[in-house]
């Protein structure tokens, strides 16, 4: 297993290299010029040219790429064109809210979806199944920002139970931190809940018709043990796969949620950096996102072996 | 058998039906039989004759979405099972009546260890600790002669052969010392040599524990070797019942005769050309169970059938010495022997 993990970690290097290559050149081929933005609207072309030279953007693209890559290998992502702050520091400052939001959303989604999916499969074609899956479809169809504003209106404005917006770092106390995450996690989580619940239901339905479930029932085991151990563990591989896809999707979903709830995370940083064509920051962020996705994939793959003893690496 | 009064299991006029798109299937259509304490009863018949459904009905494992026991009575130790609550049934299953199935490859949970699957039964029904449950699992694996039982406890089903898995199923089924073990085609999916080993093991354990066995099979060879009494089923009905020697000595129902004629025999002389007589197949097809069967269910395929057979359902009559048969023409069948 350890050998497998090490091998997989090494295999991420070429993936990251390809991502680096693409993000660098795609950004430079995209319209928009950071030098023009810095120099201001009324700047002359000489002034823009001067800014460009100062930023090193007048050099040949391939040269710029190699300068960036050489820095990267040393763990240096360069400095922001606008704030002159190191990209690594910008990202690490914004990392906590995003990681917290992603994990809490995931928790909300999984904690709701798996019981719902199991219940629907158990009571298949009964009214419980129809009601629960109806809500799941509704949740899936609702855009995150609509749901977010509805939640804010009721929970924060009308009933004043939770803060409207903003983020409290965990260092400033656990409860304010949790309170600031509840609404964003719900808004973002309900979409993924629907996805995971549907997969759980489908996977459970398949498993529940298997011979070994009949055996478990013939042993007179309690219903919860049959459902949650005998069936769910067998149904887990597709569910975990979808959760993994969900995490990948979440990373992009975070951008909208952070904007609506005014959370200073990576999503906001990304939007700002892209709008200003802050090349080093965008490049650094994309690499971090890509790295996160690769890591999630690895964790999902490893988890298969724990769920199903027949899978060997 | 051991002086206890009454049979351990009494099935009376059992009807089990399934609702399908083609209509109501009468899978079990008025079947009655007793199982005495410690005896081995065989239930024989072709695929689809209702023998597995009978077994599932006894444990009330018919999926409620599609099927139900529509009438009849099942008594275990004098207690009516058809009216027990689901919770009371669960206390009974795997504890006092247990079951093993045809497919050892798929009947064990692939993601749980063998030890867990046996121990959970013991923990559930005997209320012991997991440690004690595991110890019981070890004893049971040892009892069904799985070598290196201690190590096997932590193995998963895919690490075992088909024969070993069926041994595990038997160990699991017997782990709480049930009074009745229902074995639904327990050897059908196994190699012939393994079949014999598993049957011997079941009989040996039965002698040791006094568990009554209901052995469901389509294989008359298995019946002859292992059972004491036999029930022959056709189209959801019991057509014949007899002590095993009597049945093979003189089968009385034309269907039973047909089944026996379909067994290859080595004691029949080959003729000068070196060919043996063709195996007798039973002509025709099993009836469609969605349509009500008038008269004897076997009549359309029976060489002895008369107009009465096609219009009136023959009752089970005692032909002497506990040999029951449901046939109007039993005297003609006898003479034709």
Image (spheres, coloured by chain):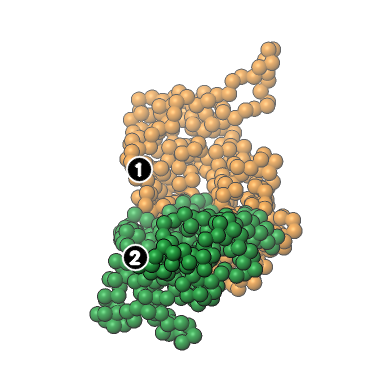
Chain colours: A green, B orange
Instruction: Categorize mark 2 by other alpha carbons within 10 Å: few (<14), some (14-19), many (20+).
Output: many
Q: In the image shown, does A69 or B140 lie closer to the viewer? A: A69
SS of the residue under disc 2: helix
At 49% from the left and 38% from the top, the residue drawn is: B47
Q: Which mark is residue B20?
A: 1
Q: In the image shown, does A11 or B99 lie closer to the viewer? A: A11
- Measured from the top left, where is residue B320 in percent x and y? 51, 39
Q: Quadrant of the C terminus of chain B?
A: top right
Work out whether disc 1 and disc 2 sit on a shared chain: no
At 41% from the left and 44% from the top, the residue drawn is: B28
Q: In the image shown, does B112 or B138 lie closer to the viewer? A: B112
Query: Looking at this rendering, what residue extends furthest in the top direction?
Result: B272
- Measured from the top left, where is residue A8 in percent x and y? 64, 58
- Measured from the top left, where is residue A262 in percent x and y? 37, 75
**A221 relative to B51, above or below:** below
Instruction: Categorize mark 1 by other alpha carbons within 10 Å: few (<14), some (14-19), many (20+).
Output: few
Q: Nearer the viewer, mark 1 or mark 2?
A: 2
Distance from Cα at disc 1 to Cα at disc 2: 44 Å
Q: Which residue is mark 2?
A: A144
Q: Which mark is residue B201?
A: none
**B224 relative to B264, above or below:** below
SS of the residue under disc 1: strand
Circles 1, 2 touching at the beta carbon (< 8 Å): no
Q: In the image shown, does B323 or A160 lie closer to the viewer? A: A160
């Amino acid at each position: 297993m350890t050998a497998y993990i090490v091998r997989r970690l090494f295999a991420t290097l070429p993936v990251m290299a390809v991502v680096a290559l693409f993000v660098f050149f795609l950004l430079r081929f995209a319209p928009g010029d950071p030098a023009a933005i810095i120099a201001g609207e009324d700047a002359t072309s000489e002034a823009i040219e001067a800014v460009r030279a100062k930023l090193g953007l007048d050099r040949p693209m391939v040269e710029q790429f190699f300068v960036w890559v050489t820095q990267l290998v040393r763990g240096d992502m360069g400095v922001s064109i606008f704030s002159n702050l190191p990209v690594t520091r910008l990202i690490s400052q914004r990392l906590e809210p995003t990681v917290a939001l992603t994990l809490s959303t995931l928790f909300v989604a999984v904690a709701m979806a798996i019981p719902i999916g199991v219940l629907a499969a158990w009571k298949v074609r009964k009214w419980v199944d129809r009601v629960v899956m109806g809500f799941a479809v509704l949740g899936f169809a609702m855009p995150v920002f609509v749901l977010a504003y509805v939640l804010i209106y009721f929970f924060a404005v009308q009933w004043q139970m939770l803060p409207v917006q903003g983020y409290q770092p965990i260092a400033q106390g656990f409860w304010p931190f949790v309170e600031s995450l509840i609404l964003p996690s719900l808004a973002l989580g309900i979409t993924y809940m629907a996805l995971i619940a549907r997969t759980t239901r489908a996977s459970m339905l398949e498993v529940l018709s298997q011979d070994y479930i009949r055996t478990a029932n013939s042993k007179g085991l309690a219903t919860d043990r049959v459902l949650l151990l005998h069936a769910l563990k067998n149904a887990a591989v597709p569910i975990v796969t979808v959760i993994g896809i969900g995490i990948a999707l979440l990373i992009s979903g975070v951008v909208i949620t952070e904007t609506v709830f005014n959370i200073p995370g990576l999503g906001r940083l990304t939007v700002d950096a892209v709008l200003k064509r802050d090349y080093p920051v965008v490049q650094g962020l994309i690499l971090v996102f890509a790295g996160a996705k690769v890591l999630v994939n690895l964790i999902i793959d490893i988890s298969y072996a724990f769920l199903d003893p027949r899978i060997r690496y | 058998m051991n002086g206890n009064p009454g049979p351990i299991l009494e099935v009376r006029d059992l009807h089990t039906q399934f609702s399908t798109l083609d209509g109501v299937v009468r899978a079990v259509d008025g079947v009655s039989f007793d199982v005495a304490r410690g005896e081995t009863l065989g239930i024989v018949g072709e695929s689809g004759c209702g023998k597995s459904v009978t077994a599932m009905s006894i444990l009330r494992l018919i999926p409620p979405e599609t099927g139900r026991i529509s009438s009849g009575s099942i008594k275990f130790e004098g207690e009516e099972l058809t009216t027990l609550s689901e919770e009371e049934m669960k206390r009974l299953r795997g504890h006092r009546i247990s079951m093993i199935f045809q497919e050892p490859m798929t009947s064990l949970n692939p993601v749980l260890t063998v030890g867990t699957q046996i121990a959970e039964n013991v923990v559930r029904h005997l209320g012991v600790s997991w440690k004690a449950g595991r110890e019981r699992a070890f004893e049971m694996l040892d009892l069904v002669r799985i070598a290196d039982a201690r190590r096997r406890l932590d193995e998963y089903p895919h690490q075992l052969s088909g024969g070993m898995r069926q041994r595990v199923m038997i160990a699991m089924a017997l782990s709480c010392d049930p009074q009745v073990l229902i074995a639904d085609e327990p050897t059908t999916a196994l190699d012939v040599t393994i079949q014999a080993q598993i049957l011997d093991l079941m009989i040996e354990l039965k002698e040791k524990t006094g568990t009554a066995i209901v052995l469901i099979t389509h294989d008359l060879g298995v019946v002859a070797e292992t059972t004491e009494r036999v029930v022959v089923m056709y189209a959801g009905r019991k057509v014949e019942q007899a002590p095993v020697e009597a049945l093979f000595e003189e089968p009385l129902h034309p269907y039973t005769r047909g089944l026996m004629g379909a067994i290859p025999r080595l004691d029949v002389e080959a003729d000068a050309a070196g060919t043996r007589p063709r195996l007798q197949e039973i002509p025709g097809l099993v009836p469609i169970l969605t349509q009500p069967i008038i008269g004897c269910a076997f009549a359309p395929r029976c060489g002895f059938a008369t107009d009465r057979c096609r219009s009136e359902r023959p009752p089970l009559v005692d032909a002497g010495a506990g040999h029951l048969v449901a046939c109007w023409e039993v005297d003609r069948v006898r003479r034709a022997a």
